[in-house]
Image (cartoon, rainbow, N blue to C red):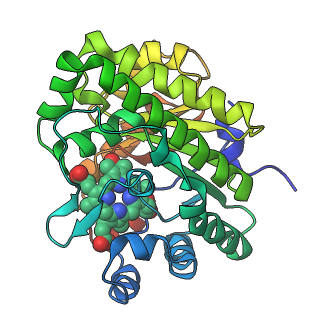
Amino acid sequence: MTEKLFLQTLKGKKTKQTPIWVMRQAGRYLKEYRQIRETQENFISFCLNPEKASTVTLQPITRFKFDAAIIFSDILLIPWAMNFNVRFKTGVGPLLDAIEKPNMFDKNCLKGLTEKLSPVSKAIELANLSLPETTTLIGFAGAPWTLITYIAEGGSSRDFKTARLWAWQHAKELDALLELITEATISFLSLQAASGVECLMLFDSWAGAVPAAHRDWLVTRPTSTIIKGVRKNGHQQPIIGFPKGFGDGLIRYAEESGVDAIGLDHETDPKWVDKNLPRNFPVQGNLDPLSLISAGPEMLRSIDYILESFHDRPHIFNLGHGITPSTPVENVQIMI
Ligand code: 1CP
C-alpha cells in the first residue's frame, strides 16, 4: 500500500493532490454531532466516553472523506486531570476556578493523570477499528501557554490580561506551572501515540497574546521540550504545531521548536509564509472559517490563492481556526 497522502505531506513530500481536513470538524455544525451530544449533558463525561468520542470522530469522515480524523476530546482535559475544577457551561464555554497566583500547585497534581485520561486511549483504539485505510488519525493537546490562559482567567478571555500579568509579575511561579503542564502534556501525547494515532498536534490557540519578548519562554521552548519528551518516550509520529497569531514569530518557531509542520491561522499571508519559512517545510491551513458561511466566489478565490501560494511546498489544506457552529454543511462540500 502506498503511504497516506497526509503522512507523505508531513514528511516533506509534495503530493499531486493536496490532503484536506478541518479543525473542529467533529462539532456542532453537524446535526449528527448535536444529536449524540444531547445524550450527555456533561461535556467532560462526553469526551471521556470512548464509544461516543470515537463515533463523533468518525462522523466528518463518513460525510466528507477527509484525509485526517482528529480524536474527539478537548484541550481542557489536561487541566481537568490535574484537578483544576473544569466544567463547561452551555452558552458560556469552559469555566475554571480562578486562582490569584500561579503558585498553588506541586507535582501531586500529576498523580494518576494517565489513568484519568485513559478513556481517550480507548477511543483511539475504537476509532482506528472503523477508519478507512487512507485516513490518518490525529491525537492532540493544548500547548502549556494556551492552557495557562484558561487557568489564569478562569475560562475564555478577550485580552488574556491575568496570564500576561503573571508573566511580568510572577515569572518564577509561572515557570514552575509551565513545567508541570509541559510534563502532563508529554504524558498525554505519549499515551495517545502509544494508543495508535499516526500524527500529533499541539494547539497553541492563544500564542498571539504573548508579547514578542516572551515568545521563546512561553511558546517556542515549551513546545521544544514537549517534542523532545515525546521522542524520548520512543514515539516518532510527526508533530504539527499551531501557534495561532504568532506572526513573524513563526520564523524562529520553525527553526527552534522541533515541530514537523506548522498550522497557519487566516491572519497570516500564505505568500509571506512561503517566502519566509524554510523550503519544503510542511504547512497546514489557512482559509478563514467565516468564508464558509456564504461560500461564494470570494471563498473560492481565497482557496485558489492559498493553493497557488503553496504550489511548491508540502501543504495540508485546512481552515485558519475551527469551523464555526453556524456553518451550513453543504458549504463544506463546496470548499472541498
Ligand atoms: O458542547 C459542545 O459540543 C462544546 C463544543 C466543543 C467541541 C466540539 C468544545 C468545547 N470542545 C470541542 C471539541 C474539540 N476541542 C476538539 C475535537 C473536535 C474536532 O476538532 O473535530 C478539539 C481539537 C478541540 C480543541 C480546543 N478546545 C481548542 C483548540 C482549538 C481552537 O479552536 O483554538 C480550544 C481553545 C478549546 C477550548 C474549548 N473547548 C470548548 C470550548 C467552547 C472552548 C473555548 C474556546 C474559546 O475559549 O474561545
Location of residue 40 in the rendering, given as x and y in whole percent from the top left corner = 36, 85
Residue nearest the observer in this picture, 294 or 232: 232
Q: Tell how many labels.
A: 0
Q: Is 69 situated left or right of 24 in this image?
A: right
Q: Residue at x 70, y 69 (%)?
A: 125
Location of residue 193 in the rendering, given as x and y in whole percent from the top left corner = 69, 50
Snapshot quadrant of residue 233:
top right
Q: Residue at x 25, y 39 (%)?
A: 149
Q: Quadrant of ligand 1?
A: bottom left
Location of residue 105 in the rendering, given as x and y in whole percent from the top left corner = 36, 39
Residue 227 seen from this side: yes
Above or below for 221 versus 132: above
Residue nearest the observer in this picture, 269 or 307: 269
Snapshot quadrant of residue 145:
top left
Above or below for 288 versus 71: above
Residue 325 seen from this side: no
Farthest-out residue, right: 1
Q: Residue at x 42, y 76 (%)?
A: 46
